[in-house]
Image (tube, grey):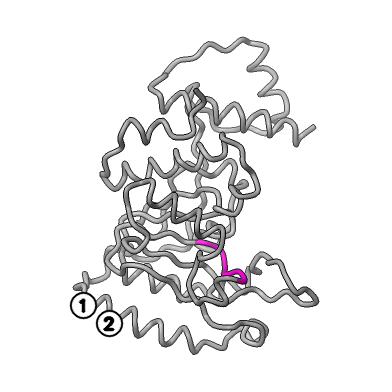
Amino acid sequence: MPGAYHQLLDATIGHLESLKQRGVRYVDASPESLSRLARPAAQKTTTAPLGQAAPTLIPQRPDEPSVYDSPKLSAADKESAMAKLRDEALACTLCEHLVETRTQVVFGVGAVHADLMLIGEAPGLDEDKEGEPFVGAAGQLLTKIIEATGLDRDKVYIANILKCRPDTPGKVYGNRKPRPEEMETCFPWVKRQIEIIQPKVMVALGGTAVEGLLGKMPSGITRLRGNWQAYRGVPVMPTFHPSYLLRNQSWLIKRHVWEDMMQVMERLNMPISEKQRSYFQRR
């Protein structure tokens, strides 16, 4: 069954990545095991050395100048530019159906001079009420993840691809995925946020954030996460959305996200302690 196969493959990749983090470079694998993993593959795939997953790359959007080609702004100029952009975004009425149901526009929050920018999907009920991204249960978990790296939430910048909560006609609770046309309409706001901040690294939280930022994904977030992408010259690390971690309490999934964040830390030249490297490893 395809589902069972992908579960087996994901578990195998996760185990190998865990070994890699511990410094293991070679593992023994029987021909029977390799045969089982290869059997369902109907098309040619890119191979990689054992113990390292083959990278999955998203075809880039049409060529645009690098974010870093824009003039460097002073801290004061960044603050002024972001405040002006915020005022404009708060008055946006392009999506009439979202304007009718939103409480307020959820623009973004954090330091405009941040090295790290995290991008999510869209506001939920709590975010729509508070006017700040990631303030509900998923936001509390995201804060813990950020703090585990040694950073503070107010030292990074957090935004969403969609600035208004997606409407849910006929429902009084729950959320829905933003539609492609909604993300396309709203994208200029996040695009300009990125240009002002000029982060050194971005983290895309979940498949919808990846799609909104980089375009259509060649595979699901399970296969894509952990593989560096790029948006206009800015390195992008795709990983699972915190809400997925709340639904799936697997230690392996948590370890995957932490491995992704350690890659981010390494890219930012942040120190990683042995204690941090051991998070979510089986004893």
Residue indicated by mark 1:
76
Residue 87 horizontal side relative to residue 67, left or right: right
**Of the residues shown, which amino acid type is indicated by label 1?**
Ala
- Under circle 2, the secondary element is helix
Residue at (67%, 84%) from the top-left corner?
97
In the image, residue 27 sits, relative to residue 135, either above or below, namely: above
* Snapshot quadrant of residue 1: top right
**Residue 48, placed above or below residue 244:** above
Q: Nearer the viewer, residue 254 or 8?
A: 254
Q: Position of residue 112 (x, y in %)?
A: 31, 69
Q: Residue at x 54, y 26 (%)?
A: 15
**Residue 264 counted in the magenta span:** no
Q: Is 122 colored magenta in this rendering?
A: yes
Residue 194 in the image: x percent, y percent? 37, 67
Between the C-alphas of marks 2 and 1, the distance is 6 Å
Q: Residue at x 66, y 83 (%)?
A: 101
Give residue 216's position: percent from left, percent from top: 59, 57
Q: Residues within 10 Å of mark 1 (few under 14, many from 20)?
A: few
Q: Nearer the viewer, residue 36 or 59?
A: 36
Q: Please state if 70 lies on the left or on the right of 277 as rendered.
A: left
Magenta span: helix, strand or loop, mainly? loop
Q: Are marks 2 and 1 in contact (CB under 8 Å)?
A: yes
Secondary structure of the residue carrying tag 1 is: helix
- Amino acid marked by disc 2: Ser
Range of magenta residues: 120-125
> Can you tell which mark lies on residue 185?
none
Give the residue at mark 2: 80
Query: How many other residues sit within 10 Å of disc 2, few (<14), some (14-19) or many (≥20)?
Result: some
